[in-house]
Amino acid sequence: MTNSLPSLAAALWDFDGTLADTEPLWVAAEYELVGSLGHEWSDDHAEQLVGNSLLDSGAYILNTIGRTDLDPAWVVDELLTRVVAQFKSGEVPWRPGALELLASLNEAGVPCALVSASYRVLLDAAIERLPPGTFQTSVAGDEVTNGKPHPEPYETACRKLGVAAHDCVVFEDSGTGARSGNTAGAVVVAVENLVHIPSAPRRVHVRSMTELDAKAVARLLEEINAES
């Protein structure tokens, strides 16, 4: 399908907390895993992990509970197993307005990419729950050398789509992800969920994706690019 909004080359989506409200699933998995190791967890600790790479999160958990004898990769596997099982077996907790905005972008012919710190196994489980062709490509956390806040994930998505980041919009719910998108050169639409996202150049905050459709996203990008 031809892109009817040529100023908007592509829309790049974070997954956890932006497309789907998976953060409660991750937090529940963290409590369960830490409890199984005989330690206590807290919501404050869980908040520190929002937007981080999974290996960084695994290391944080082990350092917090004093179990540095264990491998962060083992923690990641344990958490992923729990989250993927919950995701596949239950109703998908899509964020308000996310599916409608995706449909509007697809109808306008705007390419979309899913760009996440989560690993391929979880992204594939999510993509399988969406209409075929919703995302033209995806980048998982176990497919990049440097995770968010490094720009590599979004740079990789742009390269796979054959577009310039300057002409793309990134949807994010964390400061870590927002820095990644902005550093790559994209305009970031910050949709706060569990954590505050600081203001920054080429970054705009919206209360909900229910406020947006493809034309509104294109206008937003045009206005910010005209200013910069």
Image (cartoon, rainbow, N blue to C red):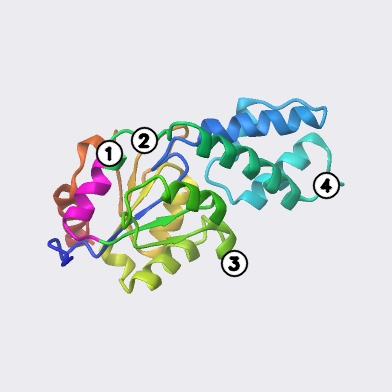
Q: Which residue is mark 1?
A: 209
Q: Judge from the rendering whether residue 137 lies leftward or rightward of residue 2; answer left or right.
A: right
Vertical relation: 8 (above or below) 74: below
Image coords of residue 113 (percent x, y): 37, 59
Mark in the foreground, 3 or 2: 2
Q: CA distance from mark 4 to mark 3?
A: 22 Å
Q: Which residue is mark 3?
A: 145
Mark 2 falls on what kind of element? loop
Displayed quadrant of residue 198: top left
- Per the rendered image, the range of residues in magenta is 100-110
Q: Which residue is mark 4?
A: 70
Mark 4 falls on what kind of element? loop
Mark 2 / mark 1, whichever is N-terminal: 2
Vertical relation: 85 (above or below) 7: above
Question: Which image quarter is the N terminus in?
Answer: bottom left
Mark 1 falls on what kind of element? helix
Give the farthest residue toward the right: 69
Q: CA distance from mark 3 to mark 2?
A: 28 Å
Cβ–Cβ below 8 Å for labels 1 and 4?
A: no
Membership of 85 in magenta stretch: no
Q: Nearer the viewer, residue 228 or 75?
A: 75
Cβ–Cβ below 8 Å for labels 4 and 3?
A: no
Q: Nearer the viewer, residue 100 or 206?
A: 100
Q: CA distance from mark 2 to mark 1?
A: 8 Å
Q: CA distance from mark 1 to mark 3?
A: 30 Å
